[in-house]
């Protein structure tokens, strides 16, 4: 168990799209750190399977639960949106009522890929985060975890991630909550990185990290230096 | 003197807009490391004054020269574009012929500021780097040095910068040249960060670093983690 702070203070985190690599990787690390987690998926049975796999790997104090996305959103105190960009708007519309009044953490990178690598897709609202805030006017959207490698999250050999999570949002209490959640991941520091209007470039920077990965054969992340 | 690699291999660097804080800061560090530098300015006398000030501070082996921007561009083997965004296009048009066949390093961040802080400005071509490449079809444009703090560059107490410079471009020889120039700055690692089409978010990320600076009272930079 990697729990570093009081487990009593951790909100119940619902990971929408939690059977994808990034969602599952975040859930895995949070569960190992004593955070109560509900995995969401379009298919409740698939969510339960993924939860069972994490429970047998980790035997966490609080077992990971699995549910359909809408039930996951209802159960969550803080929801993490980890679906592919193609399904982003539809998922948020489906879960709008269940997410009202809650902090919603958007981790989605709107990227395209061609023979020259990854590139940022244009988003009408400016960024995935701003699209989420537009679709969820009664929720408080925070952007975070854009640069965290799912491969590293899921690798049992990696005990500490050694990177910073840039946390973006317009509400101080919400960004503080998400910085604390980031710091439940071993080796991670949560760093406030600006308002939602500056989320686009943080999402898009993932394309650059993919270029770094290809050139240097690595799983790149970011540290913010603060001399 | 901070020279770490053979001075013979350093190209003569012309810093266009070299009397601004970032241009002067880069020139100062390069001159101290044995790189031949020409400072450019709209006003040749002002450029000479700034060069004289660096020469009396540093007594470099190769004295820094000062010149009007167009003469600076002619004298440069590698040119660095460090003018304010407002003057970017006009300067490049003025220097187009002098820059033909050369590596041109664009360090410009197109940012706006209001009461909520900094934000990225839209650029018709996608980014300052792409605007430069469009205006200089016979030059090889590379983006770099976007996140380097002028305050730290100019501070005599700061002996090493301890940050990475993301280097963006479509030509491997040119990005290699600029990575080597980045590594002439003490404490700096030059990291290939993708193609010019992914320059926008690197330029825009400077707005986030300004948010970090305000929140944490620092001069933030970036390190790319490569586990």
Image (tube, coloured by chain):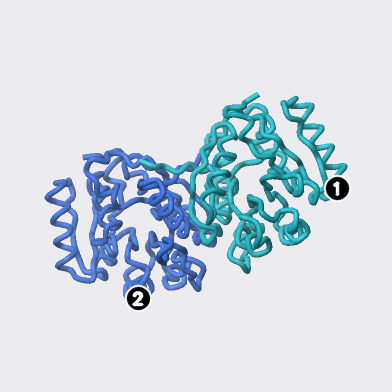
Chain colours: A blue, B cyan
Q: In the depicted view, which residue is nearer to us: B77 or B33?
A: B77
Which residue appears at 59% of the width and 29% of the height? B6
Q: In the depicted view, which residue is nearer to us: A18 or B110?
A: B110
Looking at the image, residue B207 lies above or below residue B121: above
Q: Is residue B136 left or right of residue B68?
A: left
- Residue A221 is situated, as x and y percent measured from the top left of the image, at 40, 47
- Residue B180 is situated, as x and y percent measured from the top left of the image, at 56, 39
Instruction: Please report contact status of discs 2 and 1: CB closer than 8 Å, yes or no.
Output: no
Q: Quadrant of the C terminus of chain B?
A: top left
Please tell me how many numbered marks the rendered image carries: 2
User: Any mark on residue A90, and which?
Assistant: 2
Which residue appears at 63% of the width and 30% of the height? B7
Kind of element beneath mark 2: helix
- Residue A9 is situated, as x and y percent measured from the top left of the image, at 31, 46
User: Any mark on residue B43, and which?
Assistant: 1
Q: In the depicted view, which residue is nearer to us: B11 or B216?
A: B11
The quadrant holding residue B47 is top right
Q: Residues within 10 Å of mark 2 (few under 14, many from 20)?
A: few
Kind of element beneath mark 1: loop
Q: Is residue B223 left or right of residue A24?
A: right
Residue B124 shows in the view: yes
- The chain holding disc 1 is B
User: Any mark on residue B222, and which?
Assistant: none
Q: Residue furthest right?
A: B45
- The chain holding disc 2 is A
The quadrant holding residue B38 is top right
Q: Tell me the CA gap for discs 2 and 1.
A: 57 Å
Q: Quadrant of the N terminus of chain B?
A: top right
Q: Residues within 10 Å of mark 1 (few under 14, many from 20)?
A: some
Which residue appears at 76% of the width and 27% of the height? B57
Q: In the depicted view, which residue is nearer to us: A205 or B36?
A: B36
């Amino acid at each position: 168990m990697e729990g570093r702070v009081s487990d009593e203070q951790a909100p119940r985190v619902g990971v929408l799209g939690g059977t994808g690599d990034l969602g599952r990787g975040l859930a895995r690390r949070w569960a190992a750190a004593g955070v109560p987690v509900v995995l969401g998926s379009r298919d409740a049975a698939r969510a339960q399977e993924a939860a069972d796999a994490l429970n047998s790997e980790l035997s966490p104090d609080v077992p990971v639960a699995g549910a359909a996305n809408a039930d996951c959103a209802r159960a969550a105190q803080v929801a993490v949106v980890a679906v592919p960009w193609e399904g982003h708007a539809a998922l948020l519309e489906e879960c709008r009522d269940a997410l009202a009044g809650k902090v919603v953490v958007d981790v989605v990178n709107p990227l395209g890929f061609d023979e020259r690598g990854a590139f940022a897709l244009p988003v009408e609202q400016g960024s995935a985060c701003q699209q989420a805030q537009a679709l969820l006017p009664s929720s408080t959207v925070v952007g975070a975890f854009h640069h965290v490698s799912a491969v590293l999250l899921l690798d049992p050999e990696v005990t500490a991630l050694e990177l910073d999570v840039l946390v973006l949002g317009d509400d101080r209490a919400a960004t503080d909550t998400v910085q604390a959640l980031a710091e439940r991941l071993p080796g991670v520091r949560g760093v406030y990185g600006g308002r939602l209007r500056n989320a686009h470039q943080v999402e898009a920077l993932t394309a650059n990290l993919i270029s770094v990965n290809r050139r240097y054969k690595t799983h790149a992340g970011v540290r913010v230096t603060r001399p």
